[in-house]
Image (tube, rainbow, N blue to C red):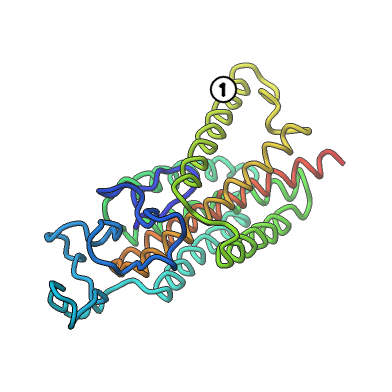
Amino acid sequence: MRSSNPVFSRRGFSRDNGYAGFNTAQQAGPANPYAQGGGANPYATDATNPYAANPYAPQGGVQGAPPMAPPQTDRMTMDDVVMRTGMTLGTVIVGAVLGWIYLTDERFGLAIGAMLIAMVLGLVQSFKRRPSPPLILAYAAFEGLFLGAISNFVDQFVAPGAAMQAVLGTMAVFVTMLVLYKTRIVRVTQRFVRYLMIATMGFLLLTAVNLLFMVFGGGDGLGFRSGGLGILFGVVGVLLGAFFLALDFKQVEDGVAYGAPREESWLAAFGLTMTLVWIYLEMLRLIAILQGDD
């Protein structure tokens, strides 16, 4: 399993035979996630994989069944994911409070530096094969500093109350997508992932082009940061973040079902945190545009 976010690629969906957990038309549930063979389990790809032993494989009375594997005590559980995610988001919140209080006015440049450091740390963790809790928590701390500073700036000079509205909006998106995912209204399939990645690449490309026009041409660039076009762009950004939440939920569900090692819960927390940060920033920008147009 590979945790995820709207910016970085998802290595958890590039195992030996394609998209882990997407070998059926439906999500985990109808298909047996514990079945041996087939390669659907990303933690049972070959005999040298220490997670290949599946304690849930059919035993006794089935001719040719593999011997019973010893129970694994270090498998990821939902409690692990919740606890690690709470720690990571808690670090973001603490950093945001400090950034709100201290990184204002002439110190705002430090907030930009914190954002760049968080970006580098996030990239490093995204390309690491194993999770590094100190690295993930450091990312969360620096990301929190930037979020606190930018939220304070928007709240004071652009749209009073925007920060709290963005927090509530992010929570609403999270709960809504969780309900849609649990009720299977939103189904994460190969096609879902393919279209989501294409849309995200297009969104990021347009964002980069707009930034270049802003830097070299001045003004608002292509107009993606204000007016009706800015509102539309903000709504698309929030929707992309919401759909990536569904992908995060799918990967957590698969990791628990397939017996992923407990350390993978840090990657799940990392991916969920980055997705929520994405949604919050898009929500903050959208609220600022809406209030600015009033």
Q: Which residue was labeled with disc 1?
A: 212
Q: At which x and y percent is residue 273?
A: 49, 57
Q: Nearer the viewer, residue 111 or 266?
A: 266
Say how many tags the image has: 1
Q: At which x and y percent is residue 135?
A: 35, 55
Q: Is residue 187 left or right of residue 225?
A: left
- Classify residue 69 by image quadrant: bottom left
What residue sits 71% from the left and 27% below the top? 223
Q: Is residue 279 left or right of residue 36?
A: right
- The amino acid on which the numbered mark 1 sits, given as a three-letter code, is Leu
Secondary structure at badge 1 equals helix
Could one spot residue 140 in this view of the protein?
Answer: no
Q: At which x and y percent is residue 164?
A: 71, 59
Q: Nearer the viewer, residue 138 or 75?
A: 75
Q: Quadrant of the C terminus?
A: top right
Q: At which x and y percent is residue 153?
A: 68, 46
262, above or below 44, in the image: below
What residue sits 52% from the left and 51% below the top? 244
Q: Quadrant of the N terminus?
A: bottom left
Identify the residue at the far bottom of this view.
60
Q: Nearer the viewer, residue 236 or 277?
A: 236
Q: Is residue 219 left or right of residue 190?
A: right
Could one spot residue 218 in this view of the protein?
Answer: yes
60, above or below 99, in the image: below
What residue sits 63% from the left and 65% below the top? 175
